[in-house]
Image (tube, rainbow, N blue to C red):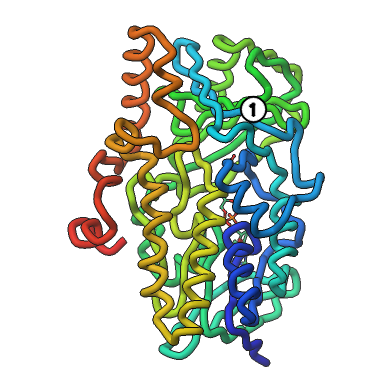
Amino acid sequence: MSEIQTDVLIVGASLAGAAAAKRTVDAGFRTITIEKKELPRHKICSGILSPRGYRFLRENFGDPPDAAFHEPKWVTGVNFLFPNGLQLPMPFIPGPTPHIYRKFADHHVIKESRTEVHEHVEFRDIETSARDVVVRARRVGSGEAIVYRAKYVIAADGPRSEVVAKLYPAFRDSIYWFVVGQKYYNADLDLDPQWFHFTINSTLGYYTWSHLENGCHIVGYTDEHGEPWPKGHAKAVEYFEQHHGLRIREEVFKEGCLENFGMSLTNNFVFGERRVLVTGQAAGFLNMMAEGMSCALHSGAIAGESIVESFTRNGDANALYDDLIQSERKRTVDQWNPLKILFDNPHEADLKAAIAKFPMTDRIYMVREMLAYVRQFRGYHWVAPILSASAKRLFLGRY
Ligand SMILES: Cc1cc2nc3c(=O)[nH]c(=O)nc-3n(C[C@H](O)[C@H](O)[C@H](O)COP(=O)(O)OP(=O)(O)OC[C@H]3O[C@@H](n4cnc5c(N)ncnc54)[C@H](O)[C@@H]3O)c2cc1C
């Protein structure tokens, strides 16, 4: 069986992979991206690209084509919904941000990165050595075995990363898993269609939201793996019916997946070792409210940059990455840091200014509900986001 040799092999043709490839291809290194699906591929996502993510996307890949947007094309901000129906709208600081269609936005960035894409190729196994990395893959459909030998590998294969599972066999059992699902309805809803609505309600699971996409109202619900998702989702629908006038005519579509939501909340990341760099959501990057596109793009670019630096200066790419990635780790973790929320503004919307517009009784109610909401996350402790990476490694273990 012949081996395909390359400087960099990226697993996963998504945002993190494209951002990494952009750096290594631009620097002149042969870069191959393997992707198990056929491109353009579907990706479950609400598609609200934060202003920072949109800036990155345009600067690095140019303006996305019209096909890369959903309707409505722009989202004004995030609207928190409380158990009693109270709404706390927070506009994005630089103004409305795009509502992207992942299938075509991801395809656009992959094409613009100019990486060689081997689609229908699924990562299976990995062997590392001091000089290079061997990846065993198989062609989806025919089952043909394919072997790659790369100087570096970037794992950009998302929440259920097989690369991480192979590198750290115990890792999957060390984190909490969440079932995320959404139903699309032909319906009416008395909420502003230009906003992303997110419940702060500890009785409604971890991430419960609604927004309009191409004429359908979506109700999404998230619970820990093992909990009865349909029951929880029905409760979420009931909340929207009772408090926000949801009137369903028919269910149009539903989808769901298993996610590693919570790694950034517990400051629990995995960045790789031995010439393998883990990035994007595979590494644990996810901002508050499951906003993972901006940190996937930025962390992917840092992984690519670390490899370029190590090639040009003959350095250790993992050591460089561990160092450079701390800015992105801190940015994500700060979103959950109560001190940062109180005395700084770690989000791309001004939570404190939005709350200040309400009478004192509402403010107290909202803060109390927010605390109850955050406290439901098992494994979350308010100290976790405050600890630096090195203190965390020292006191809490390897990850
Ligand atoms: C319901 C839902 C709503 C969301 N809404 C938003 C939102 O509004 N805004 C936001 O910013 N984020 C949102 N997110 C999060 C966001 O989708 C992710 O954080 C982001 O896509 C992560 O990007 P990534 O590049 O790290 O990985 P992914 O986008 O997960 O891509 C991984 C790629 O790797 C491929 N792959 C996986 N395994 C293999 C393998 N073994 N071999 C080869 N290829 C493989 C996959 O097919 C995929 O193409 C949402 C997530 C969910 C589940």
**Relative to 311, 393 lies left or right:** left
Q: Nearer the viewer, residue 338 or 222?
A: 338
From this viewpoint, which residue is outermost toward the right? 66
**Relative to 112, 24 lies left or right:** left
Whether residue 226 appears in this view of the structure is no
Residue 391, position as x, y percentages in the image: 21, 58
Placement of the C terminus among the 4 image quadrants: bottom left
| Image position of 182 with respect to 317: above or below | above
Residue 361, position as x, y percentages in the image: 34, 7
Using the rendered view, name the quadrant where residue 288 is placed: top left
Placement of the N terminus among the 4 image quadrants: bottom right
Give the residue displayed 66% in from the left and 87% down from the top: 4
From this viewpoint, which residue is outermost toward the left? 395
Give the residue displayed 30% in from the left and 41% down from the top: 380
Total tally of numbered discs in the picture: 1
Secondary structure under tag 1 reads strand
Q: Nearer the viewer, residue 22 or 6?
A: 22
The residue under label 1 is which amino acid type? His
Whether residue 158 appears in this view of the structure is yes
Q: Which residue is mark 1?
A: 211
Asked if ligand 1 lies within 8 A of label 1, the reply is: no
Give the residue displayed 73% in from the left and 34% down from the top: 73
Residue 69, position as x, y percentages in the image: 75, 41
Using the rendered view, name the quadrant where residue 372 is placed: top left
Using the rendered view, name the quadrant where residue 19 is placed: bottom right
Give the residue displayed 36% in from the left and 64% down from the top: 170
| Image position of 180 with respect to 202: above or below | below
Residue 184, position as x, y percentages in the image: 70, 30
